[in-house]
Image (cartoon, rainbow, N blue to C red):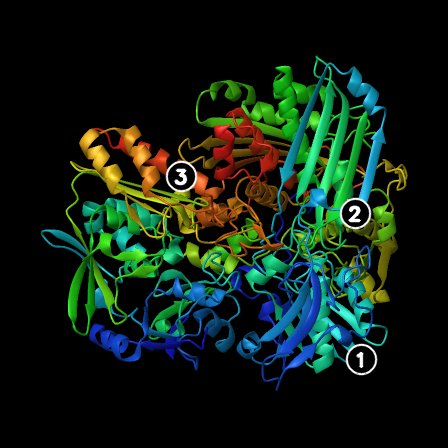
């Protein structure tokens, strides 16, 4: 099957019913997209499919045919949201982070805190309690790359 | 500019956010096989027969007879086998191991096992299988009870909790010359090493390397020894690398969970609110093997009286055997269970006395100079009143208690504490060590402590940099490979900063003396490398008697006061947490943003424990073992959190730091239950699901 | 998973032919099928992939009806101005299905065909007397939504039929929707209720019986006597909730009645 992966055309030999998650991780060797549950509950496998965040563990490979798929690798290493996730400690153990970032990419400009929570409601994090994730995402949207302020003492 | 106390750039780099960080399932090796564990489908009985109903070509098959060493997963006792020989003590107990190159062929292989079933025991209150018993006795409880103005009794329950680290358990065992290396998602590489040595025998050399780990919370403290043993066995037998990654269902069903508890309080109080006698009974459901139950019970019992002064205290605890998968370490380690009971009981005492719950706590809160239930005299770094007063002030607690009356809103608080480091003489028995190596550009930290999201690499580097007076950037951290790093003890018990960080601080001081004014680079260039390795020196005033359970249980405690504000839907009994205020005192925050992350994350996990997370057991196994049916908080379930970090430094910790990782877990359960009590619901067990609250409401 | 036999249809007529000739089961967003496959409860093995059939995705207004294509996703519904005008409670339901990732993939047709007693959109369609449009090689037929389900996970659909659309007649009266899930997002419903407070009130419940239930006796009592207490008593007889992994019969009974009262009081004056 043939699809656009992170901006370039990819040809992969995979059965039509293979999970897109496995095509990405195994056939394409891109392990940035993670499996957390295999049932579309945790969002760790989130990728963009024609611009929309989806759980790649629930997408048959054949449905990515001729579609545009973007994974965390498609952002490279210098995306401001990636830096903010590390600096604001939006990533602790990091396993949910690629999926979280991909879901956050679907946010429009100037989101409210509620918009951010809703956009990320399909991504489970067990480490952070989400607060630092909101801080990272809102700073990104505001173009604010300043370091985190210490919590009140 | 000092590194300690500032939010320096993390040593993890950016790999977690770019997808470049490599977790266990991201690794492949040439010739690698996939491994699968065939598990018992009955909770109790004996294996009668095993039939392999598949074409065995290309398969490696291993059972207990293939274990070169001892069929034991070493931990505290030697009672848990790596693989069942005949006797099955819990559902999902591992019996047979299969490996094959093709994951789908592996999954499709049919194995038929027949059993002679025996009557299982599931109810801990009926169990006669004692895993551990503890007695803490202070003063004369019976006399004090009979003389008390009022006696308040209550029984409190907590259920299982599942860790739900977003990365499931997984390891890869790879043959290397003369032995095996196991790469895996784990908290304690040296625990796995010790267990593997026992299982693989003296003729197989072993080393363990931690991969980037996607969450632990205690669920990867002892369990990985089991999965590592399985993968290693298959790798030995096949001569090829073997990867075993659990899917979410298997992980939830088969691996450890938090011990369920039943805690009974009988408390004598004076009319003025003073606690005069506490009689506490703690029962923990240990599951089918001992694993860590003795230590969970120990910590649970030591914290069972709450952060309060009481001259007459009796705490008797038992951990008992049931035919369920063994329970194990989970952040808090017994304290969330017993402090839930203690704090809900305090609000009931306040009710019985017609007293303000804040006032009751203020009267009895432990202060410097007071002794705990084990007779430990607290020092200046005891902060119960500090956190209580701040939490009450900051949330306008008393005013809201009045203002919310008659509405659908409730507000409740909990006061709690958490001892840092291993209990009593634990750190001495562990003999943890840390090492610093001089490098051409600076120093390298070589410890067995693991990064599991809490910031170990960064925090240790900050301590070493400042103790050595060198730039933070010139400190690197060795990956935890047991053949390279020192055995610093496990990454548990809120000890990674306070204990291991302290050893590193001492190593750094010694190294600084040896450098005698040179920079590391200059010294290296002139003299070459050298290392400093030291063990932990506990404070000289610590005295602990294991036999009588008396003395200084912990070098220091961290303290917390949580206030939960919530709204109850009168139609559906759903609870909407509005705000959670967490005032926490843990000495000096080494990295404030990482510390904040521990508090926010631990508090969210505690909220899940309080409201959402219910393990449904059917015939001795978790029946709701999918993330769709065992629910943890999403963004929309997690309220605004107001975190206040108060400092009361501990002189024996690095730069005055105490331990933090587990403290946040102890507060939310009782704070939520007490807020529900404020709404008129007599909640004595968690999770306080809507179904439970509907029942409370109708009583 | 990859052993599943999945063949893509390039047109609706091809899909219909495959259903008839090769006994395949339609799969669209796969948010139910792949979960079942992963969990080992999937019985079917041969599928026809209809995800690409854009002609089944339209949402449009005809003079008398709102027509929702079977492949409209929850996200399509949430964004649809037509649905916002005619059936806003369907948007309420769609917003509460899963999270954004599921909303981008799950379809209205899939929710209906999956026939779960807990399907979040089913009470909405039942309460507004929607009509399911089925098509096969032999032609098209319309089935009233309230006759669509015959029992637990059973429908009147023939094996070679495909849901192509749902038609929703004009809704008279105020719409009301409530879902009680296991948590605030990404939750399977424990109880789900949709109601219309018109001249003749209509109310439907999900997750409290083997299929979605139109509470006809409740509706009759409310229309004739406007007696909410009698209606509550009637409701108890019309639902048959159970204990399961997520909730209890007692809770579902109690909350179903509470929500009926809440529907009635909140839509008063409508």
Asked if C149 appears above or below C198 in the picture, the reply is below
> Chain under label 2?
B
Q: Quadrant of residue A57?
A: bottom left
Residue at (16%, 41%) from the top-left corner? C172
- Position of residue B41 measured from the top left corner of the image (x, y, whole percent): 62, 64
- Position of residue C23 measured from the top left corner of the image (x, y, whole percent): 31, 76
Helix, strand or loop at mark 1: loop
Residue at (77%, 46%) from the top-left corner? B128
Label 3 CA crowd tier, 10 Å (few <14, some 14–19, many 20+):
some
> Chain under label 3?
C
Residue at (53%, 25%) from the top-left corner? B678
Q: Quadrant of residue A19?
A: bottom left
Frontmost residue, B257 versus B421: B257
Kindly identify which residue carries mark 1: B178
Asked if B622 appears above or below B657 in the picture, the reply is below
Kindly identify which residue carries mark 2: B130
Q: Which residue lies furthest to the bottom in this view?
A: B57
Label 1 CA crowd tier, 10 Å (few <14, some 14–19, many 20+):
few
């Amino acid at each position: 099957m043939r699809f656009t992966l992170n901006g370039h055309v990819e040809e992969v030999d995979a059965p039509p019913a293979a999970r897109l998650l496995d095509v990405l991780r195994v056939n394409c060797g891109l392990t940035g997209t993670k499996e957390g549950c295999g049932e579309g509950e945790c969002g760790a496998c989130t990728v963009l499919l024609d611009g929309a965040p989806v759980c790649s563990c629930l997408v048959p490979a054949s449905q990515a045919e001729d579609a545009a798929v973007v994974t965390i690798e498609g952002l490279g290493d210098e995306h401001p949201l990636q830096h903010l996730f590390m600096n604001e400690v939006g990533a602790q153990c990091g396993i949910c982070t690629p999926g979280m970032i991909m879901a956050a990419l679907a946010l429009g400009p100037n989101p409210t805190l509620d918009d951010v929570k809703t956009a990320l409601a399909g991504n489970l994090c067990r480490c952070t309690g989400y607060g630092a994730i909101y801080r990272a995402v809102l700073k990104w949207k505001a173009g604010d790359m300043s370091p985190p302020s210490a919590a009140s003492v | 500019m000092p590194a300690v106390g500032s939010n320096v750039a993390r040593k993890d780099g950016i790999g977690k956010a770019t997808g470049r960080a490599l977790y266990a399932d991201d690794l492949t090796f040439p010739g690698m096989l996939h491994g699968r564990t065939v598990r018992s489908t009955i909770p109790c009985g004996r294996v009668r027969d095993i039939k392999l109903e598949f074409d065995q070509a290309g398969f490696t098959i291993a059972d207990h007879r293939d274990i070169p060493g001892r069929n034991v997963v070493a931990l505290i006792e030697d009672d848990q086998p790596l693989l069942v020989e005949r006797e099955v003590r819990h559902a999902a107990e591992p019996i047979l191991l299969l490996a094959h190159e093709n994951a789908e062929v592996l999954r499709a292989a049919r194995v038929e096992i027949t059993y002679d079933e025996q009557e299982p025991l599931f109810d801990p209150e009926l169990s006669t299988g004692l895993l551990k018993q503890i007695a803490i006795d202070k003063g004369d409880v019976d006399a004090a009870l009979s003389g008390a103005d009022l006696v308040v009794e209550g029984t409190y329950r907590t259920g299982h909790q599942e860790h739900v680290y977003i990365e499931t358990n997984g390891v890869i065992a790879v043959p290397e010359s003369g032995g095996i290396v196991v790469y895996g998602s784990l908290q304690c590489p040296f625990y796995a090493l010790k267990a593997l040595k026992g299982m693989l025998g003296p003729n197989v050399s072993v080393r363990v390397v931690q991969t980037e780990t996607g969450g632990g919370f205690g669920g990867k403290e002892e369990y990985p020894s089991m999965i590592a043993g399985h993968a290693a066995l298959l790798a030995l037998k096949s001569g090829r690398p073997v990867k075993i990654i659990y899917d979410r269902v298997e992980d939830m069903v088969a691996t450890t969970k938090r011990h369920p508890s039943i805690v009974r309080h009988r408390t004598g109080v004076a009319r003025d609110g003073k606690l005069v006698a506490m009689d506490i009974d703690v029962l923990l459901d240990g599951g089918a093997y001992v694993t860590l139950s003795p230590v969970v019970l120990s910590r649970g019992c030591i914290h069972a009286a709450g952060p309060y002064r009481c001259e007459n205290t009796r705490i008797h605890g038992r951990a008992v055997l049931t035919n369920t998968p063994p329970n194990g370490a989970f952040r808090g380690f017994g304290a969330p269970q017993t402090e839930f009971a203690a704090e809900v009981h305090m609000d009931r005492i306040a009710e019985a006395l017609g007293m303000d719950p804040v006032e009751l706590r203020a009267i009895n809160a432990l202060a410097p100079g007071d002794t705990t239930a084990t007779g430990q005299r607290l020092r200046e770094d005891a902060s119960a009143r500090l956190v209580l007063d701040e939490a009450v002030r900051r949330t306008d607690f008393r005013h809201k208690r009045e203002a919310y009356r008659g509405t659908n809103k409730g507000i409740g608080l909990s006061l709690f504490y958490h001892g840092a480091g291993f209990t009593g003489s634990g750190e001495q028995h562990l003999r943890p060590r840390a090492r610093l190596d001089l490098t051409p550009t600076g120093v390298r930290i070589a410890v067995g402590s693991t990064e599991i999201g809490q910031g170990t690499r960064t925090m240790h580097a900050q301590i070493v940099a400042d103790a050595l007076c060198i730039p933070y950037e010139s400190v690197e951290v060795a990956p935890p490979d047991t053949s390279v790093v020192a055995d610093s003890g496990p990454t548990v018990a809120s000890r990674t900063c306070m204990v291991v960080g302290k050893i590193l601080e001492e190593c750094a001081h010694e190294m600084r003396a040896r450098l005698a004014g040179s920079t590391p680079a200059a010294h290296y260039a002139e003299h070459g490398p050298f290392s400093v390795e030291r063990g932990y020196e506990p404070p000289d005033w610590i005295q602990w008697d294991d036999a009588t359970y008396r003395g200084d249980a912990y070098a220091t405690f961290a303290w917390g006061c949580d206030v939960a504000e919530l709204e109850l839907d009168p139609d559906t009994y759903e609870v909407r947490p509005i705000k959670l205020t967490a005032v926490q005192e843990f000495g000096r925050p080494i990295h404030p943003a990482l510390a904040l992350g521990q508090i926010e994350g631990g508090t969210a996990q505690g909220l899940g424990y309080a409201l959402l997370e219910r393990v449904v057991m059917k015939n001795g196994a978790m029946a709701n073992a999918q993330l769709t049916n065992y629910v943890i908080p999403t963004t929309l379930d997690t309220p605004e959190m107001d975190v206040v970090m108060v400092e009361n430094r501990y002189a024996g910790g690095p730069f005055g730091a105490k331990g933090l990782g587990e403290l946040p877990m102890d507060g939310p359960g009782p704070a939520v239950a007490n807020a529900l009590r404020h709404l008129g619901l007599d909640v004595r067990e968690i999770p306080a699901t809507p179904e439970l609250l509907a029942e409370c409401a109708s009583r | 998973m990859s052993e599943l036999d999945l063949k893509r249809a390039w047109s609706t007529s091809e899909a219909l032919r495959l259903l008839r000739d090769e006994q395949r089961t339609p799969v669209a967003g796969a948010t139910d099928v792949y979960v079942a496959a992963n969990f080992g409860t999937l019985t079917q093995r041969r599928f026809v992939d209809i995800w690409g059939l854009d002609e089944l995705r339209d949402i449009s207004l005809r003079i008398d009806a709102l027509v929702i294509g079977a492949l409209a996703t929850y996200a399509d519904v949430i964004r649809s101005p037509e649905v916002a005008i005619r059936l806003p409670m369907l948007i309420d339901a769609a917003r509460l299905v899963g999270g954004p990732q599921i909303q981008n993939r799950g379809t209205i047709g899939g929710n209906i065909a999956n026939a779960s007693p807990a399907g979040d959109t089913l009470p909405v369609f039942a309460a507004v007397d929607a009509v399911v449009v089925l098509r096969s090689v032999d032609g098209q037929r319309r089935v009233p939504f309230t006759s669509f389900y015959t029992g637990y996970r059973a429908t009147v659909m023939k094996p070679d039929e495909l849901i192509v659309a749902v038609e929703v007649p004009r809704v008279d009266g105020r719409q009301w929707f409530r879902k009680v899930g296991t948590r605030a997002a990404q939750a399977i419903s424990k109880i789900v209720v949709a109601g219309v407070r018109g001249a003749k009130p209509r109310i439907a419940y999900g997750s409290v019986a083997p299929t979605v239930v139109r509470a006809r006796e409740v509706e009759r009592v409310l229309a004739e006597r406007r007696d909410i207490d009698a209606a509550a008593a009637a409701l108890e007889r019309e639902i048959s909730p159970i204990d399961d992994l997520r909730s209890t019969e007692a809770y579902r009974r109690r909350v179903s009645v509470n929500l009926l009262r809440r529907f009635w009081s909140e839509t008063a004056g409508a």
